[in-house]
Amino acid sequence: MAEPHDFNSLPPDLPAPPDDGACDGLAGRRLPALSLPSTAGRMVALDALPGPRSVLYCYPMTGRPGVAQPEGWDGIPGARGCTVQSCGFRDHAREMAEAGATVFGLSTQDTAYQQEMAARLHLPFEVLSDPELRLAGVIGLPSFVAGGMTLLRRVTLVIRGGDLIEKVFYPVFPPDRSAVETLAWLRANPA
């Protein structure tokens, strides 16, 4: 495992992930009848998300202060930046709600881990846990392996009408701009 580092900033030489086409064909698909546990202590049905729109941002894993990341983490294109991405969605959650969208985060980390992270970062939205990669398996979300763990690649989905994938942001880079870019799209494409 690599040395612990500052999760609230990004190194200037962060490698950009390539557009490998892994999310081609997701737009226009429907989310499956699948429920995942959330940091609110409930199950969230992915085929019945709230509001005219929902934003589901998928990310590899948030770090924890004092705990080392997998070896070579910063060199894996698209791996680093989960905390700054989550904080961006936190900082723009009200504006996204005003644009008609409910925000959800999603990673493979278990719910207890995510509850600690959500409390520490003061996230005003639910984060979903999919440690078995059930959603990834059904709709083909891209993943990678680091430190012996299979993790999701960073993807942001805009869901319309509860289950229709309307817009796909992939690859997401830089991660600290993800919320701003998603909000700009929501505003330019009102529901």
Image (spheres, rainbow, N blue to C red):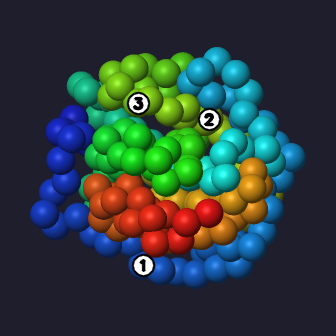
Q: Nearer the viewer, mark 3 or mark 2?
A: 3
Amino acid at the residue labelled 3: Leu
Residue 45 seen in this snapshot? yes
Residue 129's tag is 2
Q: Is residue 130 left or right of residue 9?
A: right
Quarter of the image for residue 4 reads top left
Amino acid at the residue labelled 1: Pro
In primary-sequence order, the first of circles 2 and 1 is: 1
Q: Residue at x 52, y 60 (%)?
A: 156
Identify the residue position indicated by label 1 in the image: 18
Location of residue 185 in the rendering, given as x and y in whole percent from the top left corner: 46, 69
Tag 2 near tag 1, CB within 8 Å: no
Q: Residue at x 68, y 29 (%)?
A: 37
Q: Which class describes the residues within 10 Å of circle 1: few (<14), some (14-19), or many (20+)?
A: few
Mark 3 vs mark 2, CA separation in Å: 15 Å
Most foreground residue, 37 or 51: 51
Amino acid at the residue labelled 2: Ser
Find the residue positioned furthest to the right: 33
Q: Residue at x 80, y 62 (%)?
A: 30
Mark 2 vs mark 1, CA separation in Å: 26 Å
Mark 3 vs mark 1, CA separation in Å: 29 Å
Location of residue 112 in the rendering, given as x and y in whole percent from the top left corner: 54, 19
Tag 3 near tag 1, CB within 8 Å: no
Q: SS for tag 2? A: strand
Q: Nearer the viewer, mark 3 or mark 1?
A: 3
Q: SS for tag 1? A: loop
Residue 67's place in the image compared with 158, above or below, is: above
Identify the residue position indicated by label 3 in the image: 123
Location of residue 176 in the rendering, given as x and y in whole percent from the top left corner: 28, 55
